[in-house]
Image: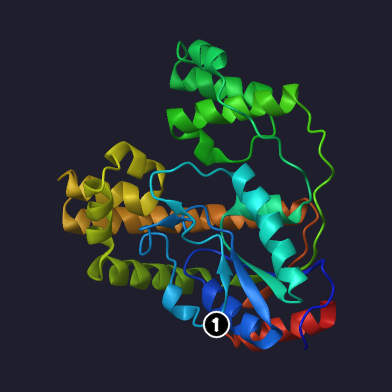
Amino acid sequence: MTKATTAQKMVVILGPTASGKTRLAVALAHELGGEIISADSRQVFRGMDIGSGKDLHEYGSIPHHLINILDAGEEFSVFEFQRRFFTAAKEITSREALPVLCGGSGMYLDAALRGYRMVEVPYNAALRDKLARLSGAELADELMRIKPDQHNSTDLLQRERTVRAIEIACGERDNASTEEPAPRMNSCVIGIRWERDLLRQRITTRLRDRLDNGMIEEVQQLHDSGISWERLDYYGLEYRFVGAYLRNELSKNDLFQHLGCAIHQFAKRQGNWFRRMEHHGITINWIDGSGDLPGQARTVIVRQM
């Protein structure tokens, strides 16, 4: 297959954590004259390498986008991702290259693929003053009242996330976007699927390798650079559990066991996200993770594109 010449064409590689997404995306980008766009909520941050699974050594000469674009500790939202994604895709296609979107963050993939334009919602001090009087349970009830189809359960796990989710929901309700519809991509979406026990083995092996090869030191360095433990907790499982270990709240064995269990549960939630995407009309062409990934993906792409 030659380089993409149609601006709207895109290949998407998705799957749960540790499924082999990056390696497949790089192989396809080599074959198809592509550039990779990361759909990961943490790979945007410099210094968050091992915990976020950047695997930059796999990219070689392949250009990549939305990786290492912000300092750790800065804010990054799905709105900002969508805006930057559209810009990157436009720039890539202007070079007659093929955008290859790769990641496992369901909200980010959804924002790129479903073609809705998000509303930028600023900080609302008056609303936050009202919300400050509510308990965690009352905040969750308020979010579900405003947005009954709420699907991102992680917004209910931390007070800061719930408050921001309410702020966004109110802003979207009160300020319908007047922007032009988002550009629709002609996307060939490929999902990597593993048998459950094999995926669990891959997750466990990958976690052990990361813990033995610098992830703990990475989290310590981030904290030493001035990022609070509370802020690191916000960046996800690896940073939350390793932070607890560094504060002597977990033993090394408990860190491995508890973090491994949490990542397995996260992979299950990712699967739920992907099924939800299919329910909303996104066709995912599933391929067998234990087989010839590039060969299977090539067959799908030739058939669809």
**Residue for point 19% across, 59% down:** 253
Question: In the figure, 75 relative to 301: above or below?
Answer: above
Q: Which residue is mark 1?
A: 290
Q: Amino acid at mark 1?
A: Ser
**Residue for point 33% across, 55% down:** 259
Residue 289 in sight in this render: no
Rendered-image quadrant of the N terminus: bottom right
Q: Which element carries disc 1, helix, strand or loop?
A: loop
Rendered-image quadrant of the C terminus: bottom right
For disc 1, the neighbor class at 10 Å (few under 14, some 14 to 19, many from 20) is: some
Residue 113 percent location from the top left of the image: 74, 56
Question: In the figure, 30 relative to 286: above or below?
Answer: below
**Residue for point 26% across, 43% down:** 226
Horizontally, residue 119 falls left or right of residue 252, namely right
Q: How many marks?
A: 1
Residue 101 percent location from the top left of the image: 65, 66
Question: In the figure, 199 relative to 114: above or below?
Answer: below
